[in-house]
C-alpha cells in the first residue's frame, strides 16, 4: 500500500537511489581487494632466488616474533634478535660474488639530545644501544661514494611480539639484501642496510647512527621502512626534502602507493618515525617514509603476531623496494653530504615539494609545486570568468552580475549541503550515545559506521536542494527563453564546481599538498558538464540520458574517492582505539563524532559532485524519509553490537606501582589502571567481573568513590601519560617484589657539591637501578631552579607543566649497563631541587601476573611494574 501512495517522481527517485547504491557497491568491490592487498600474489618459499619472496620474509618474522621471546629494550630477546640479523647478513656475505664488496659491522651508540615528541619537550639520554649495519657496494667503490640508506628497527614496543612493528620491516630488508646478492645485480652505488635497535624509545639508535657512524656523510638518500599496522597499503607518508625522492618512487614503484596529502596530516598523528632523524632533525637527507597503515587494531599490542599480517602486503613492499633501490642508485641526484650542500642552492629538486598520488596502485601521478601553482589555479579562474564568458556567449542577453549571483547561490547551497553532511551524522552520533551504555559500537565492525552515518550524511547533502525553489534566480527566465530548471541546473553545477575550486586554491595558498583530490574532482566535473550539455544539444533534453552522460565521466574520479575515502575511514576507525581518552563530558562523545564527521566528509567528496544534476532525482521527501529510517534502524541495530573483539581489542594499561625509599624499602604499592579510548575503566570492570572481583570492586564503584591515579604516577611512560584520563588505582601488597629484588632504584650524591658565586650550585648525582632485571626506561622529573645539567650538550629542554605540579624538566634514560648513571644538575639559587625517579621494569610479580591473566581476549593489557622514588637536593 505504501508503494501505491508514491508518486511517479518518488518511484523514479528510489530507482535512481538504488542504481547509485549498486554503482558505489561495484566501486567498493573493486577497491576493497586493493586496500587489503588481495590483488598481489605472495611468492612461496621455493620462488626463484632472483625474486623477492614473501614466504622467505615471513620465515624471518617467525623467528623474530615467535622463537625470540620479546625484543624490548632491557630483555634478552633484543640481543638475540641482533645476533640473528647479523648471522643472516653473514650468510648473505658468504654467497656474494667477487664483483661486489660487503661490509658488516655492529656498533654500539651512546648519546643525549633534546626533542619535541607528541607536542611535549623532553631530553633523552641513552647508552649501549645496538645497530647492525651492512654496506653492499661495487668492488671498486670508494668509501666516500654517495650511498643509499635503508632503515628498519628490530626492537619492539612494550608487551608486543612486534611481527608487524617492525619484524616485517627487518624481514623485508633481509630479503631485499639477499635478493641484491642472489640476483647477480651489482648496484652502481653503495647500499647501506641499517637495522637499528632503539626506535620505540624515540628514535635513539637512528640518532646514534647519524651522530657517530663513519658512513653517515656518504648517505645521498634514504628509505625508512615502518609499520603502524599489520599490512595494507605500504604508503609513502612523508617525502623530502625536495621533490626528487617522490619522483624516483613514482617512476619505479611496481605497486605505487603514495598520497602527498599524508604529509599534511602526519604531524597531527600521535607518533613519529626515524624519518625525522634522517630528513629533518640531524641529516637533511632526501628520503621516503614508507609505512604499513592498516591493521592498526594490532599496532603496539600483544596481537601483533604473524597470523595478523595481511597476505600480499610484504610481497608488494619487497617488489617496490627492490625496484626503488635500483632507481635511486642509478640516479645522478644521489650525492653525499658535501656535494649536496654545494649543489642545493641551485637545485629545485632539493627545495620544492611535489604533489603526488597513486590511482588504485595502478599508476602514479606526480607534478611539481610550480606546475601545481598553475594547475590548481585553473578551476578558480574558470569559476570567476565563466559569468563573463556566458554573458558574451549570449551577446549580452544575460547579465554577468546576475549569472555570478546565481553561481554564488549555487556555491552557498552546495557548501551548506556539505556542512550538513558532516553535522547531521554528528548529531545522530550524539543522540545515539545519550541512550547507549557504551561508545564506539562500530570499532570492531567498521561496516556499522557506514550503515549508521552514510544515509544521514546523504540527508544533509540533500536538505538544501529541498529549499532551492524558495530562493528565486537573479536571471529573468522570460527574457532568456530557457527553462528555469536549466538555469537552476547551471547555477547548482557551477556552485558545486566553485566549491571544489575554492578548496583547491585554499590548499595551494596554505602550502599543503592535498589539493590534488579537489582538483581531480573539479576537472572531472567540468568534463561531465560539457558532456551532458552536448548531449542535450544534440539529443534533446532527456533527463535520464543527460544524467547518465553526466555520471559516466565522473566514474574514474568517484572510484578514486571511494578508494581514498574508504582507506581514510578505516584508518580513522582503527586509530580511535589508541588516540587517548579525553576527560568527560566531551571525551565520551569524541570518537563517535570524529568517525561521523570523517564519513560525512567522505560522503561529500564521493556523492557531492553528482548532486547538481542527480539531485533532481533524489531531492524528495520520500527519499529523505527512507534515508532517515535507514539511519534510525542502523543506530538501533548498533546498540546490539559489542565494540571490541580479539580482532579489535580494547587497550588497557596496567601498572604495578611501587613507591620506594632508601633503595630497599617499599613505602606503598598499588595497581594502577588506565585506558586510551572513550569507554572508561568502569566499562571494563563491568564486562570483566573476574578482575573486578579480584580487586574487590563492588557494583557501586564510581570515579567519585574510587582512588584516582594521577599523571605523576605514570611518569615512567611519559609523554604517553597524556593519552590517559580518569585512571584508577587499588591498594595491594608488596611481599612478592621484596622476594624478587634486593635493591631498588636509588639516586644519591657521589661527590661534594660545587658552590658558585651568586648562590648557584652544582650537585653531582649517581643513579643506581638496583637489581631490577628488565628495565625499559628511566624517567627523571626535575623541578626547582634548574639552570643546567650534563645532558644534551648542557642544554635544557623547555619546561613542561604536569597537571597539579610546578614546571618540570623531563629526562628519559635508557640502555643496559653494569655501571650506574652519573651526571650533574646545576641550580641557580639556594632553593631545593626535587627529583622524581620512575623506572619501568617489564617484570610482573605473583598476584599481578594472575590479575593480568583474568582479562578476556577482547582486552589487550600492557602490563609492567613502575618503581617511583623522590629526592630533594
Image (tube, rainbow, N blue to C red):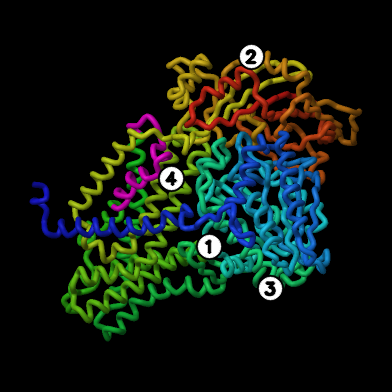
**Circle 1 Cα neighbour tier, 10 Å, few/some/many (<14 / 14–19 / ≥20):** many
For discs 4 and 2, the disc positioned in front in the rendered view: 2
Q: Nearer the viewer, residue 768 or 640?
A: 640
Lower sequence index among marks 2 and 3: 3
Residue 700 lies, with reference to residue 440, above or below; the image says: above
Magenta stretch bounds: 434-458
Residue 672 lies, with reference to residue 554, above or below; the image says: above
Label 3 and label 4: CA atoms lie apart by 41 Å
Label 2 and label 3: CA atoms lie apart by 66 Å
Lower sequence index among marks 1 and 2: 1
Q: Position of residue 99 (x, y in %)?
A: 78, 67
Element class at badge 2: loop
Q: Which residue position is annotated with label 2?
A: 733
Lower sequence index among marks 4 and 2: 4
Tag 3 near tag 4, CB within 8 Å? no
Q: Which residue position is annotated with label 3?
A: 347
Tag 3 near tag 1, CB within 8 Å? no
Lower sequence index among marks 4 and 1: 1
Q: Nearer the viewer, residue 815 or 793?
A: 815
Q: Is residue 174 visible?
A: yes
For discs 4 and 1, the disc positioned in front in the rendered view: 1
Q: Position of residue 321 (x, y in %)?
A: 62, 60
Label 1 and label 2: CA atoms lie apart by 56 Å
Q: Which residue position is annotated with label 4?
A: 594
Q: Position of residue 14 (x, y in %)?
A: 20, 55
**Circle 4 Cα neighbour tier, 10 Å, few/some/many (<14 / 14–19 / ≥20):** some
Lower sequence index among marks 3 and 1: 1
Amino acid at each position: 500500500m505504501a508503494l501505491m501512495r508514491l508518486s511517479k517522481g518518488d518511484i523514479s527517485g528510489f530507482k535512481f537511489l538504488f542504481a547509485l547504491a549498486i554503482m558505489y557497491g561495484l566501486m567498493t568491490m573493486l577497491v576493497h581487494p586493493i586496500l587489503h592487498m588481495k590483488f598481489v600474489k605472495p611468492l612461496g618459499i621455493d620462488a626463484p632466488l632472483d625474486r623477492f619472496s614473501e614466504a622467505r620474509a615471513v620465515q624471518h618474522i617467525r623467528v623474530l616474533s615467535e622463537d625470540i621471546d620479546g625484543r624490548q629494550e632491557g630483555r634478552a630477546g633484543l640481543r638475540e634478535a641482533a645476533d640473528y640479523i647479523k648471522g643472516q647478513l653473514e650468510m648473505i656475505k658468504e654467497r656474494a660474488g667477487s664483483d661486489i664488496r660487503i661490509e658488516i659491522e655492529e656498533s654500539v651508540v651512546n648519546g643525549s639530545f633534546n626533542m619535541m615528541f607528541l607536542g611535549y619537550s623532553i631530553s633523552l639520554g641513552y647508552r649501549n644501544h645496538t645497530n647492525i649495519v651492512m654496506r653492499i657496494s661495487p668492488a671498486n667503490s670508494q668509501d666516500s661514494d654517495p650511498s643509499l640508506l635503508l632503515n628498519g628497527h628490530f626492537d619492539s614496543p612494550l608487551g608486543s611480539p612486534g611481527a608487524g612493528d617492525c619484524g616485517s620491516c627487518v624481514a623485508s630488508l633481509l630479503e631485499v639484501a639477499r635478493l641484491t646478492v642472489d640476483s647477480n645485480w651489482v648496484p652502481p652505488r653503495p647500499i647501506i642496510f641499517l637495522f637499528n635497535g632503539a626506535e620505540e624509545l624515540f628514535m635513539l639508535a637512528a640518532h646514534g647512527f647519524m651522530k657517530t657512524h663513519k658512513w653517515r656523510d656518504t648517505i645521498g638518500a634514504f628509505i625508512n621502512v615502518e609499520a603502524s599496522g599489520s599490512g595494507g597499503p605500504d604508503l609513502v607518508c612523508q617525502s623530502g626534502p625536495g621533490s626528487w625522492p617522490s619522483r624516483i618512487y613514482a617512476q619505479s614503484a611496481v605497486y605505487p602507493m603514495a598520497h602527498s596529502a599524508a604529509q599534511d596530516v602526519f604531524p597531527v598523528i600521535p607518533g613519529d618515525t626515524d624519518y625525522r632523524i634522517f630528513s629533518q632533525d640531524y641529516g637533511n637527507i632526501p628520503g621516503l617514509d614508507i609505512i604499513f597503515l592498516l591493521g592498526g587494531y594490532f599496532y603496539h599490542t600483544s596481537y601483533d603476531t604473524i597470523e595478523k599480517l595481511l597476505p600480499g602486503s610484504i610481497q608488494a613492499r619487497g617488489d617496490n623496494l627492490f625496484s626503488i633501490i635500483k632507481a635511486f642508485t642509478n640516479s645522478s641526484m644521489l650525492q653525499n653530504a658535501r656535494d649536496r650542500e654545494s649543489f642545493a642552492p641551485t637545485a629545485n629538486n632539493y627545495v620544492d615539494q611535489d604533489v603526488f598520488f597513486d590511482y588504485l596502485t595502478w599508476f602514479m601521478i606526480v607534478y611539481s609545486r610550480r606546475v601545481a601553482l598553475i594547475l590548481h589555479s585553473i578551476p578558480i579562474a574558470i569559476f570567476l570568468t565563466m559569468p563573463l564568458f556566458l554573458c558574451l556567449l549570449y551577446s549580452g542577453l544575460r547579465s554577468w552580475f546576475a549569472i555570478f549571483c546565481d553561481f554564488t547561490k549555487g556555491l552557498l547551497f552546495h557548501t551548506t549541503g556539505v556542512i550538513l553532511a558532516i553535522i547531521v551524522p554528528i548529531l545522530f552520533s550524539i543522540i545515539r550515545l545519550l541512550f547507549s551504555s557504551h561508545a564506539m559500537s562500530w570499532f570492531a565492525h567498521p561496516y556499522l559506521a557506514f550503515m549508521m552515518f552514510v544515509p544521514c550524511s546523504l540527508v544533509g547533502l540533500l536538505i538544501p536542494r529541498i529549499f532551492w525553489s524558495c530562493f528565486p534566480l537573479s536571471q529573468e527566465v522570460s527574457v532568456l527563453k530557457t527553462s528555469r530548471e536549466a538555469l537552476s541546473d547551471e547555477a547548482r553545477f557551477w556552485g558545486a564546481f566553485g566549491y571544489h575550486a575554492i578548496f583547491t586554491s585554499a590548499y595551494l595558498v596554505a602550502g599543503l599538498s592535498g589539493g590534488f583530490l579537489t582538483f581531480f574532482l573539479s576537472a572531472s566535473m567540468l568534463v561531465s558538464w560539457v558532456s551532458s550539455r552536448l548531449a542535450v544539444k544534440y539529443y534533446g533534453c532527456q533527463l535520464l540520458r543527460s544524467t547518465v552522460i553526466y555520471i559516466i565521466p565522473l566514474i574514474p574520479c568517484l572510484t578514486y574517492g571511494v578508494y581514498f575515502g574508504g582507506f581514510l575511514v578505516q584508518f580513522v576507525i582503527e586509530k580511535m582505539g589508541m588516540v587517548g581518552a579525553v576527560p568527560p563530558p566531551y571525551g565520551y562523545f569524541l570518537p563517535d563524532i570524529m568517525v561521523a564527521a570523517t564519513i560525512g566528509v567522505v560522503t561529500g567528496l564521493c556523492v557531492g559532485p553528482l548532486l547538481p544534476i542527480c539531485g533532481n532525482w533524489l531531492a524528495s521527501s520520500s527519499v529523505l524519509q527512507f534515508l532517515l529510517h535507514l539511519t534510525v534502524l542502523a543506530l538501533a541495530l548498533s546498540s546490539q553490537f559489542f565494540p571490541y573483539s580479539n580482532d579489535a581489542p580494547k587497550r588497557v594499561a596496567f601498572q604495578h606501582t611501587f613507591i620506594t625509599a632508601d633503595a630497599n624499602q617499599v613505602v606503598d604499592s598499588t595497581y594502577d589502571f588506565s585506558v586510551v579510548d572513550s569507554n572508561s575503566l568502569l566499562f571494563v570492570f563491568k564486562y570483566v567481573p573476574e578482575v573486578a572481583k579480584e580487586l574487590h570492586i563492588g557494583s557501586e564503584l564510581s570515579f567519585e568513590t574510587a582512588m584516582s591515579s594521577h599523571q605523576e604516577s605514570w611518569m615512567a611512560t611519559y609523554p604517553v601519560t597524556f593519552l590517559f584520563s580518569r585512571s584508577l588505582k587499588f591498594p595491594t601488597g608488596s611481599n612478592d617484589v621484596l622476594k624478587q629484588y634486593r635493591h631498588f632504584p636509588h639516586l644519591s650524591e657521589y661527590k661534594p657539591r660545587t658552590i658558585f658565586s651568586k648562590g648557584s650550585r652544582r650537585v653531582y648525582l649517581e643513579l643506581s637501578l638496583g637489581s631490577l632485571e628488565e628495565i625499559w626506561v628511566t624517567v627523571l622529573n626535575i623541578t626547582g631552579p634548574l639552570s643546567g645539567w650534563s645532558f644534551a650538550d648542557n642544554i635544557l629542554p623547555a619546561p613542561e607543566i604536569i597537571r597539579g605540579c610546578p614546571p618540570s624538566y623531563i629526562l628519559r634514560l635508557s640502555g643496559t649497563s653494569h655501571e650506574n648513571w652519573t651526571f650533574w644538575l646545576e641550580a641557580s639559587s639556594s632553593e631545593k631541587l626535587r627529583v622524581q625517579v620512575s623506572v619501568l621494569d617489564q617484570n610482573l610479580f605473583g598476584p599481578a601476573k594472575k590479575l593480568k591473566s583474568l582479562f578476556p581476549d577482547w582486552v589487550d593489557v600492557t602490563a609492567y611494574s613502575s618503581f617511583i622514588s623522590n629526592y630533594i637536593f
